[in-house]
Amino acid sequence: MFFTFLVVLAIAYLLWRVTDQLPDLIFRLSEIQRDVAEIRRRLADAEGSSADTAEPAPGAAGSSSGPTPSSGSSTTGSGPEAG
């Protein structure tokens, strides 16, 4: 019976210590969440600006990035479809 009392007392003490530190823990987690959101925003801005300057958008006029889906069906008669 005395051992059970000591266990309950230890649990109560640990819960008291955790709840005592809870406001600080919540503040730190909110700071981490804000920092992560800022990092994601910066990465998204960097990707957006590098994509704008690095290469043109697919399907843009003068783009030589490769065939587009509309150019796959040729009616000129050349290629494996002809014949």
Image (cartoon, helix red, strand yellow):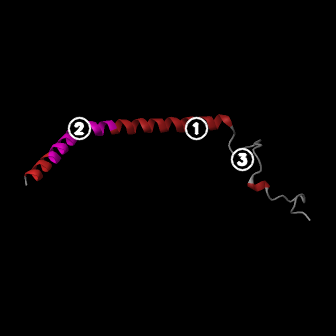
Task: Name the residue beneath numbered marker 2.
Answer: 21
> Dividing the image into 4 quarters, which one contains the C terminus?
bottom right
- The x and y percentages for residue 18 are 22, 42
Residue 64 figure quarter? top right
Could you tell me if the residues under marks 2 and 3 are in contact, i.e. CB atoms within 8 Å? no
Is disc 3 in contact with disc 1, using a CB cutoff of under 8 Å? no
Question: Looking at numbered disc 1 in the image, what kind of residue is underneath it?
Answer: Glu
Distance from the alpha carbon under mark 2 to that under mark 3: 56 Å
Residue that appears at 72% across and 47% down: 59
34 and 1: which is toward the camera: 1
Q: Are marks 2 and 1 in contact (CB under 8 Å)?
A: no
Q: Is residue 16 magenta?
A: yes
Q: Residues within 10 Å of mark 3 (few under 14, many from 20)?
A: few
Q: Which residues are magenta?
A: 10-28
Q: Which mark is residue 59?
A: 3
Does the stretch in magenta take in 72?
A: no
Q: Residue at x 75, y 52 (%)?
A: 68
Question: With respect to residue 42, does 70 lie above or below?
Answer: below
User: Residue flagged by tag 3: what amino acid is it?
Assistant: Gly
Sequence order check, earlier mark of 3 and 1: 1
- Residue at 54% x, 36% y: name it: 45
Q: Nearer the viewer, residue 44 or 11?
A: 11
Dividing the picture into quadrants, the one containing residue 73 is: bottom right
Note whether 51 is above or below 78 in the view shown. above
Residue 37 as seen in the image, left or right of residue 23: right
Residue 47: numbered disc: 1
